[in-house]
């Protein structure tokens, strides 16, 4: 698919603000792509060149990111999940597949914990409780938050109040604990770059242990962004996972 030719831009309103999205109309399963912390939907451009054109694809700028609304609210995971749910009800009107990267993977998993989805694809997902427990064993929460905001402020003209609000909730009750992940009933594929130096690939097996029946695929040679590093491998994984 050609991102510049085969996708149409849109905006949809939610009770939390409007969401900006790109849509490729296909006659098969709808798939929603959720980007990482401080990123935007443009991160999927390279991957989309490899995906099956039969897929009905929606790429969303999550609340506070890209061209979507950035209200002055508490950017909790449940708030992002609520905005995604309203988007699905308005635009998709069916249970979709969710593909979430990093922070978007956290939102996707939490959404599937609370709502019905056709399938779940988590790429190097953030939010895993055991990961946060490990972070706190080596540095303070405040040091971690400062470094995360500092790095994300270099990207995409991000708004500092949005980023600070997101990281302020990182150590709250909406982490992906065993009790949260064990409620996910959708078939789940966990993708991880074998050279990820942001979130250790060891957490793939920990997450898989908590999500009953989930599959793990390590992407050889990829770092934290397999969809960019190895788009062909990620596309193959998506095609093999989704029932067309």
Image (cartoon, helix red, strand yellow):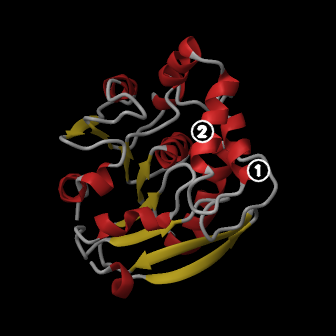
Q: Are marks 1 and 2 in contact (CB under 8 Å)?
A: no
Of marks 1 and 2, which one's residue comes earlier in the chain?
2
**Observer-nearest of 222 and 6:** 222
In the rendered image, is residue 136 in sight? Answer: yes
Q: Give the side of residue 221 with respect to residue 9, left or right.
A: left
Instruction: Identify the residue at image location x=65%, y=19%.
Output: 140
Q: Quick check: 222 left or right of 82?
A: left
Residue beneath label 2, please? 148
Residue labelled with disc 1 = 161
- Height in image: 22 above or below 175? below
What is the number of callouts on the image? Answer: 2
Give the residue at x 49% y 47%.
108
Q: Please report the residue visible at 25 percent of the width from the left and 44 percent of the height from the top.
A: 222
- Kindly tell me whether residue 170 is visible in this rendering: no
Residue 241 placed where, x, y %?
A: 23, 52
**Coordinates of residue 201 in the picture (x, y in percent):** 32, 29
Q: Position of residue 120 (x, y in %)?
A: 38, 48
Q: Which quadrant would the N terminus be assigned to in this image?
A: bottom left
Please, which residue is most extreme toward the right here?
A: 72
Which of these two is toward me, 50 or 114?
50
- Which disc, if any, is residue 139? none
Find numbered disc 1 in the image and state the secondary structure of the residue it sits on.
Answer: helix
Residue 127 drawn above or below residue 48: above
Q: Residues within 10 Å of mark 2 (few under 14, many from 20)?
A: some
Q: Which residue lies at the image location 30% right of the left edge and 35% below the top edge?
A: 214
Residue 106 drawn at (x, y percent): 51, 41
Q: Is residue 194 left or right of residue 163?
A: left
Provide the secondary structure element on which disc 2 rests.
helix
The alpha-carbon separation of the residues under discs 1 and 2 comes to 13 Å
């Amino acid at each position: 698919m050609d991102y510049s030719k085969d996708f149409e831009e849109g905006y949809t309103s939610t009770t939390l603000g409007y969401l900006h999205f790109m849509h490729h109309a296909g006659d098969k399963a709808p798939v929603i792509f959720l980007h990482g912390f401080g990123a935007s939907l443009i991160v999927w451009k390279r991957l989309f060149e490899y995906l099956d054109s039969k897929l009905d694809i929606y790429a969303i700028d999550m609340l506070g990111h890209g061209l979507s609304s950035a209200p002055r609210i508490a950017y909790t995971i449940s708030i992002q999940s609520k905005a995604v749910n309203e988007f699905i009800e308005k635009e998709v009107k069916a249970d979709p597949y969710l593909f979430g990267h990093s922070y978007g993977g956290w939102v996707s998993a939490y959404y599937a914990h609370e709502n019905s989805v056709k399938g779940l694809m988590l790429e190097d997902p953030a939010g895993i409780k055991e990961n946060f427990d490990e972070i706190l064993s080596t540095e303070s929460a405040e040091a971690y938050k400062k470094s995360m905001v500092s790095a994300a402020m270099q990207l995409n003209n991000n708004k500092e109040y949005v980023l600070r609000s997101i990281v302020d909730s990182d150590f709250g009750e909406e982490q992906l604990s065993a009790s949260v992940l064990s409620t996910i009933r959708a078939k789940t594929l966990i993708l991880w770059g074998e050279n990820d130096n942001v979130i250790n690939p060891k957490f793939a097996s920990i997450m898989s242990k908590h999500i009953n029946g989930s599959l793990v695929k390590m992407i050889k040679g990829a770092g934290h962004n397999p969809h960019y590093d190895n788009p062909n491998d990620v596309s193959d994984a998506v095609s093999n996972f989704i029932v067309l």
